[in-house]
Amino acid sequence: MRLDKFLGELNIGTRSEVKKYIKKSQVTVNGKIEKDPGKNISETTDEIAFKGDALTYEKFVYYLLHKPKGVISATEDKEKTVIDLLKEKDFRKDIFPVGRLDKDTEGLLLLTNDGKLAHDLLSPKKHVDKMYFAKIRGIVTEKEVEKFSHEMTLQNGDVVKPSELKILKTDEKAQTSDITLVIREGKFHQVKRMFHAVGMEVTYLKRLSMGSLTLGNLPYGTYRPLTLEEVSLLKN
């Protein structure tokens, strides 16, 4: 990899800024000052340092985000995106969210630059479980549990695969229900549309897990790198 590309991918600066740093003798390769931006280096075996600080290159990065409401699941938008939540040291131009959560939906969102893993997690053929917690306007009964356990046709004609609906509690006076729902695909507004199909409304929605990855006690609006074990489990 070219030295300037290496530094750029680590968000040291823009391409022109990186070249200035190199020309000013602020970059070393294996302990020696390097002034050629085009020098080919090994991102895995060469020791690269900027202003004396060693740099570590990771081909793929994986972040678990507890997405807050009001943030768009996109890389660029006129409104605030999930990528904007990354600290400067963690930002890379090739990071993207795996799938999407609606603007008003909270919970687990994976950010990565690993396209193959993202494709596998989102492919309907892989049957990756996604668990949601939701508050429903309406009383969910065993009738809905049974209906959701089979293929369902939504109001626009879309057919969704069988899901696992669990009733956590109901409030007859308020006419509300708390539920969890496990789906194995990710059609547009799917959870909300499934409840619309049975005459109910989702008033709050939060994703708790995706495959082997769980939100756990990650604070609202924060993120963390995945552990090696978590990445391995996702890939397998």
Image (spheres, grey):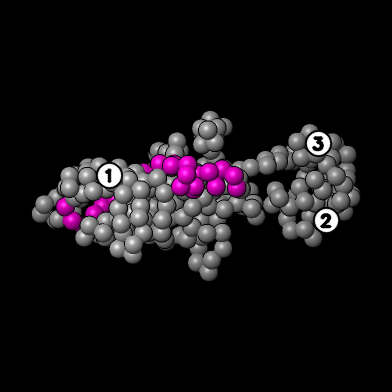
Which numbered disc flags the more N-terminal residue, 3 or 1?
3
**Which one is nearer the viewer's eye here, 18 or 135?**
135
Which numbered disc flags the more N-terminal residue, 3 or 2?
2
Please state, as top left, top right, bottom left or bottom right, where the N terminus lies in the image: top right
Looking at the rendered structure, the secondary structure element under dot 2 is helix
Identify which residue is drawn at 88% across, 39% down: 32
Q: Tell me where the magenta segment starts and ends, as one range.
A: 115-139
Q: Give residue 12's position: percent from left, percent from top.
A: 72, 51
Q: Which amino acid type is shown beneath numbered disc 1?
A: Ser
Looking at the rendered structure, the secondary structure element under dot 3 is loop
- Rendered view: 10 above or below 153: above
Label 1 vs label 2: CA separation? 59 Å
Disc sitting over residue 192 in the figure: none
Q: Give residue 231's position: percent from left, percent from top.
A: 55, 35
Report if residue 129 lies within the magenta region.
yes
**Which one is nearer the viewer's eye here, 80 or 158?**
158
Looking at the rendered structure, the secondary structure element under dot 1 is loop
- Read off the residue under disc 2: 19
